[in-house]
Amino acid sequence: MKPLRRRTVLFVQPTSEVGGADLALSRLVAGLDKRAYRPIVALPGPGPLVDRIEASGGSVRFVPMPPLRRSLNPWTQGKFAAGFLPAVSALGRIIDRERVDLVHSNSLFTLYGGAAARRAGRPHVWHVRELLSRRGPVRAVFVELVRRWATEAIAMSAAVAGMLASGPRPAPSRVIPDGVDLEQFHPRVGGRRIRAELGVPQGAPLVTFIARLDPWKGLEVFLRAARLVREEVPEARFLVAGGPIPTHARYARRMKALAGDLGIASCTLFTDWRYRLDDIPEVLAASSLLVHASIEPEPFGLVLIEAMACGRPVVATAAGGVLDIVVDGETGLLVPRGDPEATARAAVRVLRDAPLASDLGRTGRERAEGQFGLKTCVGRVESVYRDILDGEAAA
């Protein structure tokens, strides 16, 4: 019997940086069964994601793809429009040359993949990782594009699937969460190195915020909650692990000034980008508690799964994809969006109640093992590929 040919999947990725969606892509590429799939990743240019993709067993092709932004700046939109057809043509050449079987777009805002797949007559998986929470013409246009251009749509959470199902012409999708390596993120990981580097005593409570410093991630809420926590737990320290993206450098400076204005500068550690992705398990291990404080609904919340896999309790905003991850009172505590007082009360409750913290950490790990293991989540994506490609072969 002739062995089946490995199927080539072309991933279209709108950025070469490393954020949540980018990290999820590198983990997906790493977890794919390389006996069955040959991953190629189209990136807009050099960047930190390149090494991670190549280390994950994928090969990289550079295709200039001007980003689609929400900005109304005519120069920005004109640059996207001028670069659209050349990028689609370049992707088409890769599809032909590499005998690509399936195109996988890794963002709602990656229009290039759907257009190239449509032109080349290839199936297209559209992985939707964004949540447009407000109804309106922009959301309606994107939902319609997914409905028309996706052979299959993958939503990373029930909230994202609900967005795609809204309106008079819904786009059906399968909900597949992102997964984490349960060996890399594990309760046995130690955090002594991180505490020693930061000068945090081993016994001191350390409340941690991990995110890029983008206003919607809610750092201001975290800092205002930290001031209230400090009043109740004077020995507590606070860690802000993450730096600004280039467009938000002024916001980062403002947040550091706010810590001073709130009187918590001496107990709040801003590490900027000192700790990279491979350090995050140890950062979480060093932490007593992870606080997620987004003021807009998250499409998912990958750092929450990472914390739970490490056996750390979490306090998180009750909105969006977070509701798929955190079971209130069992694997973490949920609080209203933009509410520093409620966030502080939940954090103090965890810090003062060691048995509660232990129970939340234990059940969080169990939920991560049952729902969010990388192998399980990658297997669900592969099942989408099989359904599409086996269906084509049988047709």
Image (tube, helix red, strand yellow):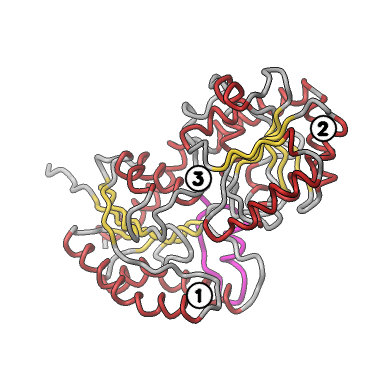
Q: Which residues are magenta?
A: 157-178
* Residue 237: percent from left, percent from top: 73, 30
Residue 240, picture quadrant: top right
Residue 158, picture quadrant: bottom right
Q: Is residue 386 above or below residue 206?
A: below
Which structural element holds mark 1?
Answer: helix
Q: Earlier in the sequence, mark 2 or mark 1?
A: 1
Q: Residue at x 47, y 26 (%)?
A: 183
Q: Nearer the viewer, mark 3 or mark 2?
A: 2
Crowd class of label 2 (few under 14; some 14 to 19; many from 20; radius 10 Å)? many
Q: Residue at x 18, y 48 (%)?
A: 5
* Residue 374: percent from left, percent from top: 46, 37
Q: Residue at x 74, y 34 (%)?
A: 266
Which structural element holds mark 2?
Answer: helix
Q: Which residue is mark 3?
A: 178
Q: Which quadrant holds the C terminus?
A: bottom left
**Kind of residue at badge 1:** Glu
Q: Which residue is mark 2?
A: 348
Kindly report the distance in space between the C-alpha atoms of the residues bearing marks 3 and 2: 30 Å
Which structural element holds mark 3?
Answer: loop
Q: Which residue is mark 1?
A: 144
